[in-house]
Image (cartoon, rainbow, N blue to C red):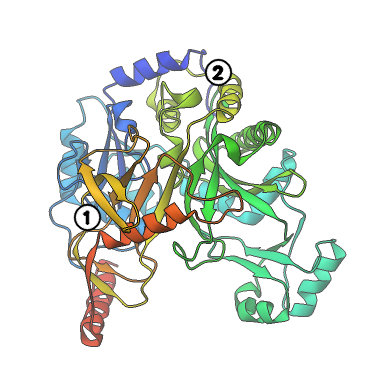
Amino acid sequence: MSEKKPVAPLEEVAQRLRASKQPVFYVSRTATHLVGVEAFVPGLSFITLVDSWNATHPAVFVPSNIPNPAPRGNISVVNWLLKNPEVIAHMRARTPEGLKPQVLLAFFDETSEALCREMGLELIMPSNALRHRLDSKMVTTQLGESVGVMSVPNVITRVASWAELTRAASENGLGSDLVVQTAYGNSGETTYFIDGQERYEAVAAKLRDVDVKIMKRINHLPLAVDAIVTGNGTVVGPILSEVTGHRELTEHAGGWSGNEMSPSVMSAEARAKGVEMVRRFGDGLAREGYRGTFGIDLLIDTDTDEVYLGELNPRLTGTMSITNIPTGAFAALPLIALHIAEYSGLDVGVDAAELCEASAAAGASSEEWSHMIIRATDPRPHRILQAPLTGVYRAVSGASRLEFVREARDWHSLQPGEVFYLNTVADGGFSTRGTDLGIVYARTRVQDNERNLTPEARELIASAHALYRMSALSGVQNFVRKARLAIAIATRR
C-alpha cells in the first residue's frame, strides 16, 4: 500500500496538478478514455495511432510513419508506439530537464513494461503480473468474499459434461437457468447463458479443462463504477448503468457497448451500498499491492434490490470517458486525475471517505449522460473511404442523419439536444464486423427503464453509421488484404 498523505481539499489537489510540470503521456490506439482531462492536468497529453481530430488537437501526437496495414490489437498498438523513434523523440522533447516521462496505458503486457524500462519511461500503472492475476473472474470472486463483497450465488469448479454442470448447479442451489464464465474475457466474450443441454453443447469445448464460475441467473441491472486506490483509501466515482447486449451495437449477448449516468438508474439505498462495496473491494486491492485506477461491474437484482459484485477491470476502463466528465463530487477534478496525483509525488492527498460519501450523494442528483460504441455490423469487409469529422452534431429528426454543428475537442460542454461524435478510424483503413468505428455521446439516456434502446437511440445509431463512406471489398481484394495483414503480423513479431 502507498504511503498515506496529509489530507487536502480536492480544489487544492487540482491546483497543484495544474502547476505541476510533470509530463504524463497516455499511449493508446485512440485518446478516448481520457480526452478532456488535459484541461485539468496540463501535463497530460496523448500519443495515438488514430488522429480523431485531423491534427487540430494540440495535446494529441500521431507519428507520421504508420505502416499499411497498421498494427492491430490494443497491446500490439501500444508496443509499436513505444518502440517508435518519433514517439520517443516527442516524449523527450516535452519532458523538462530533471524529470522522467510518465506513461499511462490502458492495455499492456510484459513487453510493454520492458520497453518502458529500456526507454527510461516510468509506467504509472500496477504491474502486468498483478493485473493479470486479479483480472481472473475466479480471483475477483474470492477477493470480494474475503472483504464481504459478495457475488451472485455461484460455485467455482470444473465441468466436463452437461451432467456435471447440472449436478454442480443443483448441489449449490443455483437452479437450471445459469450464467457460466471462464476466467478471462472482455465485453461479454466469455460469458455464456445456458438454460438447457443444447445451449451447453454449443459452447462445451470452451468450458472443458478450465475453471468456470457457474452462477444463478437473476433479473438484473448491470452497473459500472470506476475507482482509485490511493494511500488515503479508495475513492469511488459515480455509478453508471451499462448499455449491453443490443444487437445494433454488439454481436455478444452480454457485450458492453456504452454507459449511462442518471439519477434514476438505482435507488439511493442501493447506490450507497454500491459505493460502500466498491470502497471495501478497493481497500482489499490495496492489501494486494494494487495502486491506482480500476473498474468494477456491479449487478442489482431487480426483484430484490440486492447489489452483487460482478467483475473487476484492473485498468483504465471504457467507462472513464463518462466518469471523467467534471460534475457532481468531481466537478473540481476528474476522477482519473487522482490516479495521476497518486503517482505524481504530490505531498498531499484527498479525504477518500469524504469523497465517497459525496459521490454517493451527488449520484442521486447527477446530470444525465450516455455514450454508445458504434461498431461495424456488416459481415462483409469494407474499405473506409471517408470517416466523419469529430465534433458536435445535431440529429435531424426522422431522417436518420446527423448534421455537423461545430468542431470540438471533447464532449464536456455538450448542450441538451446536441450529440458529440468521436471518430476512431482512419481514412483508407478497413472495417469488418465488430470494428469500433466511433463513439456517440449525448446528454440523455439511450435506454428505457426496461433496458431497451429508445427509438431516439436506434435512430442515432443509424445516423452514426450513415456518417461513413465505405466500399465493400471484392473476394480478391479481401484475399489481398488478409495476405498483407498476415505478412505484417509475421514481420512485426
Could you tell me if the residues under marks 2 and 1 are in contact, i.e. CB atoms within 8 Å? no
Mark 2 to mark 1 CA distance (whole Å): 43 Å
Identified at 22% across, 47% down, the residue is 404
Q: Residue 217: x, y in percent?
A: 72, 60
Packing grade of label 1 (10 A; few <14, some 14-19, many >=20) is many
Identified at 72% across, 57% down, the residue is 218
Name the front one of labels 2 and 1: 1
Q: Residue 109: x, y in percent?
A: 41, 54
Q: Can residue 450 be seen in this view?
A: yes
Q: For the view shown, which residue lies furthest in the bottom direction?
A: 476
Q: Nearer the viewer, residue 312 or 174?
A: 174
Asked which secondary structure carries label 2, the reply is loop
Q: Identify the amino acid type marked 1.
A: Pro
Number of labels in the image equals: 2
Packing grade of label 2 (10 A; few <14, some 14-19, many >=20) is some
Q: Is residue 76 visible?
A: no
Residue receiving disc 1: 388
Q: Residue 334: x, y in percent?
A: 42, 29
Q: Which of 118 and 358 is in front in this view?
A: 358
Identified at 41% across, 33% down, the residue is 325
**Image quarter in which the N terminus is found:** top right
Image: 107 above or below 252: above
Asked which secondary structure carries label 1, the reply is loop
> Is 97 on the left-hand or right-hand side of 419?
left
Residue receiving disc 2: 351
**Image quarter in which the C terminus is found:** bottom left
